[in-house]
Image (cartoon, helix red, strand yellow):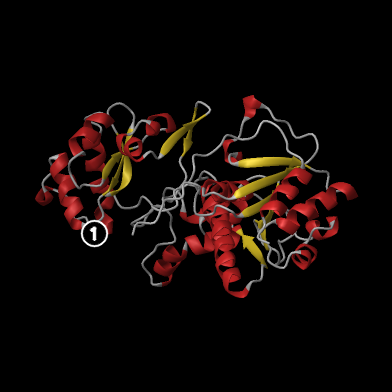
Amino acid sequence: MQTKSNPRGPLNGLRVVELGGIGPGPHGAMMLGDLGADVVRVERPGYGFDADKTDFVLRNRRIVILDLKQESDLQDLHGLVAEADVLIEGFRPGVAERLGFGPEVCIGANPRLIYARMTGWGQSGPLAARAGHDLNYISITGALNAIGRPGERPTVPINLVGDYGGGSMLLVQGVLAALVERSISGRGQEIDVAMVDGVSILVQQILSLHQLGKWNADRGTNMLDGGAPFYDTYECADSKFVAVGALEPQFYRELLQGLQLDTDDLPNRDDVAQWPALRSIFAARFRQQSRDEWTALFETMDACVSPVLDFDEAEHHGHLTARGTRIEIDGLSQAAPAPRFTRTPAPVPTAPPRQEVAASDVQAEWRADSPS
């Protein structure tokens, strides 16, 4: 018998209190909300609901305004936490405790609470109390040093590596793991989510290759960092770019076929010393046609060649359109919730709120919906 689909998402019924911040905390809360969780974000007084400055990372939220230095507002927060499943905070270590809503207090009042602490350096260690940003967190892990071209300074990547790859993704993983454990033990716990830890997990494969002597410390000289001419980007006749990822021999053969090049006339791809000469040949060939001409030529070939698109172009790419990877909310293009579930599909995201709600109303609603 086929089970009826629930369109409210796999996390329907999960209650999340998010203490306002920037970066991975809001992004992680967004992903939980995308999958059906009821997320209530606590903002400071003076928070502006400016429609012209809407941050769609704040979709799927209700917003409560509280001054946590005021006793009455602090009690309102405690009221929410008493009914919540998850609390997400991103303050420096010790700040939440000093303000009166640290994990000991909150879990003491709600033993089933998952208290997730999202920071860059973590809750312990000599840098724990220091300021920092994505670039700082990835710099001490070795990840930043590995990104860039030979002989050049490390390339500053978008803050995907630290904030989101090593931050919000680890946050969501930790919350979901703690919820699974709670289903067995019946108890919540504190989670120390540190971007330096998450980035270190992300670079595990590269670290392993390095320790096996298969990864050169000189950036831009390895198989996966742009060092290999068959795993790189190339400029085309129209000054746009294609990405080439023809690592395996069978894909490399397809690449050469599309470029109308003969293996016997080319430098040996397995000889690192000949990579510069091979790259020059590829670069000259790609400059002979436009990006879209190359895209059309390789469209039906397994050469692992794809166009390098900007955000506006990506919105209209045929594959992403067919999958519905981008959706529209309030007239603006957004990423659709992911991953996808057959029985409990994620709901259509709601736009960021335009007005606050009262903490007492949320608490009353949650209390009324709690199992008796």
Exactly how many numbered labels are in the figure? 1
Image position of 103 (left or right of 160): right
Compared with 122, 332 (above or below) is: above
- Residue in front for this viewpoint, 148 or 341: 341
Image position of 103 (left or right of 158): right
Image position of 150 (left or right of 370): left
**On-image quarter of the N terminus:** bottom left
Q: Residue 366: horizontal and vertical position, in percent?
A: 69, 51
Q: Residue 235: horizontal and vertical position, in percent?
A: 31, 35
Q: Quadrant of residue 307?
A: top left
Compared with 114, 358 (above or below) is: above
Q: Residue 216: horizontal and vertical position, in percent?
A: 40, 62
> Can residue 90 be seen?
no
Q: Residue 360: horizontal and vertical position, in percent?
A: 78, 45
- Residue in front for this viewpoint, 142 or 16: 16
Residue occupied by mark 1: 271
Q: Residue furthest right?
A: 71
Q: Quadrant of residue 183?
A: bottom right
Compared with 202, 310 (above or below) is: above
- Residue in front for this viewpoint, 311 or 65: 65
Look at 38% across and 52% down and name the residue there: 342
**On-image quarter of the C terminus:** bottom right
Image position of 70 (left or right of 334): right
Look at 73% across and 38% down and name the residue there: 357
Look at 17% across and 44% down and name the residue there: 301
Kind of residue sitting beneath label 1: Asp
Look at 69% across and 63% down and name the residue there: 113
Compared with 254, 107 (above or below) is: below
Label 1 crowd (10 A; few <14 / some 14-19 / many >=20): few
Q: Secondary structure at mark 1?
A: loop
> Can residue 50 be seen?
yes
